[in-house]
Each structure stands twice: as C-alpha cells, then as structure tokens.
Amino acid sequence: MCELDGRSESNAMYYRIVEFLQEDGITLWAHTYNVVKQTPKGVWIYDQYCLRRRFVLNSARKRYALPTIKEAKESYRERKLCQIAILDRQLNTAKTCLDYIQDTDKNARVFFFTDE
C-alpha cells in the first residue's frame, strides 16, 4: 500500500459534497477520497486537494468524508442547515446592534472607552 500518493490496494472510496459558486449559479461536486488505511476506529483517506492524509473517525458525529454518496449528501445538508442557523444569528445580532445605535433614546447607554 502506498501512503504517500493516496493509492492503496483496496478500491474503497469516501465522499464529501462541496459547492462552487460560479457566475451562472452553484455547482455541487462529490469529492472522492481514496482510503489509504483502515483501522478498527476509522479510516485514513488521502486528500488529493490538500495533498495530505486525513483520519476519519467512524464514531464521530461530524465526519469529514463518508463512505457513500447518500451519507455525503445528508452530511452536506446538515452542514448547510448549521451554516444558515449561524448566519441567521449573526444577521439578527447585526440588525439589533444597528437598531440600538440608531435609536436616540438608547444612545445614552452607549459607552466609549478611550486610552486616556
């Protein structure tokens, strides 16, 4: 088994869905990763995009890559739902802060700290 370039004796593959933003829309790709070594706890995959090996723990809640396209799609869906939730919270915080600073009644509670 050759662990340097990602080739192995087995043909096992793992998958991760990623998106590419383009002028005419979004393209989804299933990146494929060769399994370099299997262990009782997980697998080592070769990431040809970053030119390094990665360990994928079988029991982890979030795994970098998965053994089937179906699992990779579900993982992508969950990642995007988390991304939306995080960005929604950030947007709500930004709107609240903007409303707060624009409200003249509340400006009395704004504190400015200086180095003096």
Image (cartoon, grey):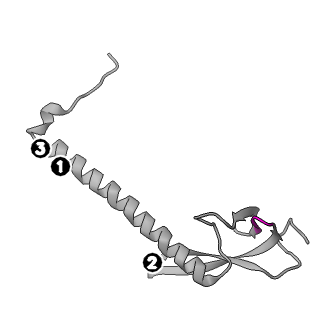
Q: Which residue is mark 1?
A: 99
Res. 19 in view = no
Say whether marks 1 and 3 touch (CB < 8 Å). Answer: yes
Which of the 4 image quadrants contains residue 116?
top left
Looking at the rendered structure, the kind of residue marked 2 is Glu
Residue 42, magenta (yes or no): yes
Of the residues shown, which amino acid type is indicated by label 3?
Asp
User: Is 6 situated left or right of 54 in this image?
Assistant: right
As rendered, which of 18 and 22 lies closer to the eye?
18
The answer to which image quadrant residue 39 occupies is: bottom right
For numbered disc 2, what is the local secondary structure?
Answer: loop
Residue span colored magenta: 40-45
User: Measured along the vertical axis of the image, is residue 61 above or below residue 101?
Assistant: below
Residue at 77% across / 75% down in the picture?
Answer: 34
* Quarter of the figure that contains the N terminus: bottom right
Q: Position of residue 44 (x, y in %)?
A: 77, 66
Query: Dot 3: few (<14), some (14–19), or many (≥20) neighbours within 10 Å?
Result: few
